[in-house]
Structures are given as C-alpha cells and as structure tokens.
Image: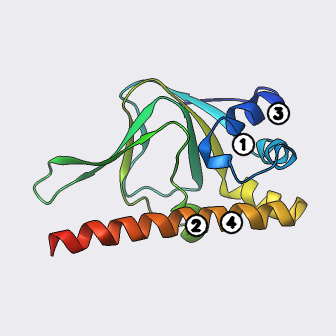
Amino acid sequence: MTDTEPPVLVRAELLEKCQWASEFTWKEIENLARYLTISRIVQGATIIKEGTAGERMCILVEGRVDVVKDDESGHRKVLTTITKGKAFGEMTLFDGEPRSASVLAAEPTALLVLTREKLERLLDEHPRLGAKLLFKLGKVLSQRLRMTTGQLVNLI
C-alpha cells in the first residue's frame, strides 16, 4: 500500500463525489480533506488483516473491496462487498480493538484514509466538524448493526 498526498482540493473533490459525504458542506469537505491521505491498492492485496491492531478507517473512492472472515474450518467467507463511496474500518477509531475481519482489494482500489491521530487533531482544531463526523460515523455503525440484527434473526 502506498500513501500519497495530492493537494487538498483533489482529496476534497474525491470525497465530495462519495455518497458518504453527502451530509457535509463543501467547506466542511475541504477541511476534512486536510486530515485524509490517499492510498492506492493493487488488486488482491490485503488492506486490513483480521486480528491486527488498527487505527484507521477508509472511504472507498475507486474500486471494490471484499470483507472476509475465515469460518471454524478455515474456509474464507465473503461477508460483504463494499463499493465506491462507502466507508470501512471505522470501529477501530472508537474502540482501538483488533480488526474483526479482513478486507481485500477485489480490484485496483483507491482509498481516502483517516487515522485515529488525525481524527483527534481534527477534533482539537475543528470541534464542530469533528462532532459532525463522529455523529456520521455513529449513524453508519447504527445502520450496520440494524442490518446485521435483521440478518441474524433470519438465521435463528
């Protein structure tokens, strides 16, 4: 994985094109982009490895990734496929726990990455924007929990 830092405007434009950022104004997107880096990933690469420590979340701006987990017999299962405009890895920003699943690049991929360190800096420097971002992340986590609960009830 390689990280590059193009101008803030480029990162802001990539973020603006994502449905993930639809609740933010252009000025908020520009400010948020100052805390993001871009990572380009080759097809087949492991972006996140289950069980490892994590301190970053990713917003997919190009490509497609698979969230995978090995079952009890060691067979890899695809839990979901994440497409352009969606985020993943945000749980670790809240709890710092090891990753609960692996994420693999299903095709060449570009990500906007927010680390825990940069999130903390954002909260210090732009507390209103930081709070808005945290509410957005909480909403995403809540939606995922509701979806998982709905799927789980069908298996019981």
- Label 4 belongs to which residue? 134
- Label 1 belongs to which residue? 36
Disc number at residue 5? none
Q: CA distance from mark 2 to mark 4?
A: 9 Å
> Mark 2 or mark 4: which comes first in sequence?
4
Quarter of the image holding residue 148?
Answer: bottom left
Assess whether mark 2 and mark 3 are in contact (beta carbons under 8 angstroms): no
Residue at the spot 88% in from the left edge and 60% down from the top edge: 126
For badge 2, the amino acid type reads Lys
- Marks 4, 1: nearer the viewer: 4
Assess whether mark 2 and mark 1 are in contact (beta carbons under 8 angstroms): no
- Marks 1, 2: nearer the viewer: 2
- Label 2 belongs to which residue? 139
For badge 1, the amino acid type reads Leu
- In the structure shown, which secondary structural element does the residue marked by tag 2 occupy? helix
Q: Is residue 139 above or below residue 77?
A: below
For badge 4, the amino acid type reads Leu
- Label 3 belongs to which residue? 8
- Front residue of 135 and 154: 154
- In the structure shown, which secondary structural element does the residue marked by tag 4 occupy? helix
Disc 4: CA contacts within 10 A as few (<14), some (14-19) or many (>=20): some
Q: Is residue 41 left or right of residue 134?
A: left
- Front residue of 150 and 10: 150
Disc 1: CA contacts within 10 A as few (<14), some (14-19) or many (>=20): many
> Mark 1 or mark 3: which comes first in sequence?
3
For badge 3, the amino acid type reads Val
Residue at the spot 43% in from the left edge and 55% down from the top edge: 52
Residue at the spot 43% in from the left edge and 58% down from the top edge: 99
Disc 3: CA contacts within 10 A as few (<14), some (14-19) or many (>=20): some
- Marks 3, 2: nearer the viewer: 2
Regarding residue 115, the answer to whether it shows in the image is: yes
Q: CA distance from mark 3 to mark 2?
A: 26 Å
